[in-house]
Amino acid sequence: MDFDTVAKKIVSDSICSAVCVDNAFEEPYTPTEDPEKDSFKIPKELYKSFKTQNCILDIYKYVDLNDWENKKENILRNKDLLILDWELTDGDPPYKDALEILLEAVRTESLPFVYIYTQEIDLNKVVLNIRAYFSGISSEDLRRKYESLCDKLEELPEVEDPNKLLRGMNETCKEILIHTDKSKEIRKEIFEYLQRELEIDLEESGKFYKQLCNIGQEVFITNTHDDLFKFLGIFLNPSQLREKPVSDIDIHPVKDEEYAFLIHNTIVKISTKKLSAMEGIKSDVVSPEEVYSDLSRTIWKRPSNFLALLGLEMRNLYRDRSSIIGQDLNEIDELAFFKHQKSFEDTDEQERFYEFLKNIWKEELSSFLLDQSPALFSVLDEYKNRNNIDDGLEKLQKKPENFIDDFSKLNYYYSVLRFDWKNPRKIRFGDIFSITFEKNGDLEEVYSYLLCITSHCDCIRPQKVEDYLNFVGGKKLKLKKGLKIGDSGCISYIKANEEVVCIEWRKIPFTIHIAPNGNDISKPIKCVFSGRDITLDYLATQKENYTQRIANAAFSYASRVGIELVGLETEEE
C-alpha cells in the first residue's frame, strides 16, 4: 500500500461513532405519523448511509443552548466525529449557538474531527466568525483598543482621518485572517494602499507601515504585525465575538487545504451543504463518503502530519485491543477473586489492590505492541521522500536553535502523562508540584518545584513511613541549556500556561511530612519545608522510567561515603 491509501484507511477506521447536530432533523426511527416528512426521512437515510461505512450515527435535534448544556456530555461522549449545522437557529446571527457547540467540541479531548456544513456560499464569512470567536478579545475591549489606536494615529502629521484610513484596509485585514499563508502578498497590498491614501512614495509608505505597526502592536499587545492586522480585520468586518473571550484555543490553518483548520488539536473542516448526490437524500445534506474524503485529504495534506496520523492509528489499535480486557475472567469463579480482594481489605490496603488491578489491565491492553506494528511504519520511507525530510534534517543541523520549542514539546510528550486528574487522590511517585513559600520576604528560594520520588507502595500507604514522603527540588532551566544536557542530567519537561518549562533537579533527596487530611493533589497542599510554611500545587505526573532515573541518582547521592588515603603526587615519567 502507498501512503495515501494507508492514510485514508487510518481516518476511516478512526471514525466509528458520529453525531449530527441539526435543528431541522428528528432522531431516526422516532414514532411519527408522517414518515415521508423531510425532518424524518433525511436523517433516517443519513443514518443508513453512515452505517454502511461501519459508523454509528446519532442525530441530535437542536432546540436551544439550555437543552444542549443538559445533554452535551452524553451527546459528545465516545464520539469520533461531530457533524455540525452552522445555522442552528433563526436568530441574528443564526450561527451564534453553533460557535458555542464548536467550542465545547474542540475542548473534548476524545473528539478528533468536526465537520461543519453550511448554507452560506461565501465560506470566508464562516472562517471570519470562527477566527473572531476564538480571538481571545471581547467586543468592548476591541472597540476601546481601536479607538486608542485612532487617537495615537491622529497625532501623526500624515494622518487626517485615522478611522477612514484604517477602514479602507478592512478587506485586506480580513484576508490576513482567512489566508494566513499569504501575509507577504497582503503586506504589499497594504504598502500600495498607504501610498495611494497618504499620497506618498513607496519608500515613505514602508516607513509609515512600520510606524503604524509599532503603535498598533503596543496598543493591541501583539507579537507580530499579522496579529495586529487580524484584530483590525475582526473589528472592521461584521463578526461574532464571545461575551467571555476564549484565550486558550489556538487555530492553525491546514496548508494547501481550503477551509480546514487545526483548532486545539481537533481537525475542523468547513463545507457547503450543496454537495451530496446520494440517492434518497436531498442535495443539501452531507454524505459519509464526502466527510471521509474531505477529512482524509485534510489530514494527509497537512504539513508534518506523520505524528498526527500515527496518533490516530495507535488510537485505533488500542480501541480494537480494548475488547479483550477481562476476556478470560468469565471462566474463573468470582470467589477466588474476592478471596484475593479480602486479603487486602483485611489489612486496610484496598487502594493498593485497585492499583494492582489497573496495572494488570494496562499491561494487557498494551501487550499487542509486542507483535503488531502500525501500518504507517510500512510507508515511512515514502512519506520521508515525499516531504523531503532528509533536506529538512540538513537545515535543522545548520540551525538547531530554530527547533528548540519543538524539541522541548517532544520531550514533554515523551516523559509526562497528559492526563487531567479531576478526582481527589494522594501524592504519587512522579508527581511534580510548584512550591510557594509563605512569608518569604526577599530571600531567594532554593527550589521552585518539587518531584515526589517516594516508592509506589509508600505513596499508597503513607502511614507506613509516618506520612514522610521523599522529594527532590528543582528550578527552572532555559530550554536550550536543558536540551544540551539531554538525557545525561536530571531534568524534566512540563507545561505551564501552555508553555513548555524545563526543570533541573538537584540530586539531594529530603522528606516532607504530608498530613493525612491534606494529602490530596486536587487542592493546594499545606506543609512545612526546612522550618517554613509552604504550599504545593500539583502540575503534572512524570512517567515512571523518567522519575525512577532521577530517584536512583538522588538516593545514590545519599549513600555516598567519603574516605581518605595517602597518595603520591603525579610526576612526569
Image: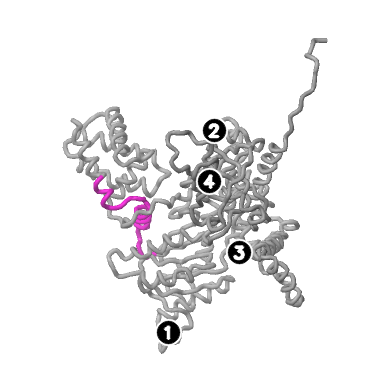
Q: Quadrant of residue 270?
A: bottom left
- Which mark, residue 13? 3
Q: Which residue is mark 4?
A: 528
Q: Main secondary structure of the magenta part?
A: helix
Q: In the image, which residues are magenta? A: 118-144
Left or right of 470 on screen, residue 566: right
| Mark earlier in primary sequence (4, 1) | 1
Q: Which residue is mark 1?
A: 36
Mark 3, secondary structure of its residue: helix
Q: Nearer the viewer, residue 4 or 375?
A: 375
- Residue drawn 53% across and 74% down? 49
Select label 4 or label 3 by which is in front. 4
User: Does the CB distance between marks 3 and 2 fall below 8 Å?
Assistant: no
Residue 331: give x, y in percent of width and height. 76, 76
Mark 2, secondary structure of its residue: helix
Mark 4, secondary structure of its residue: strand
Amino acid identity at mark 1: Glu
Q: Say which quadrant the N terminus sits in.
A: bottom right
- Residue 40's place in the image compared with 360, above or below, is below
**Residue lying farthest bottom?**
33
| Mark earlier in primary sequence (4, 2) | 2
Q: Which residue is mark 2?
A: 401
Amino acid identity at mark 2: Glu
| Mark earlier in primary sequence (3, 1) | 3
Select label 3 or label 2 by which is in front. 2
Q: CA distance from mark 2 to mark 1?
A: 64 Å
| Mark earlier in primary sequence (4, 3) | 3
> For mark 4, does the 10 Å Cα neighbourhood hold few (<14), some (14 to 19), or many (20 or more) residues?
some
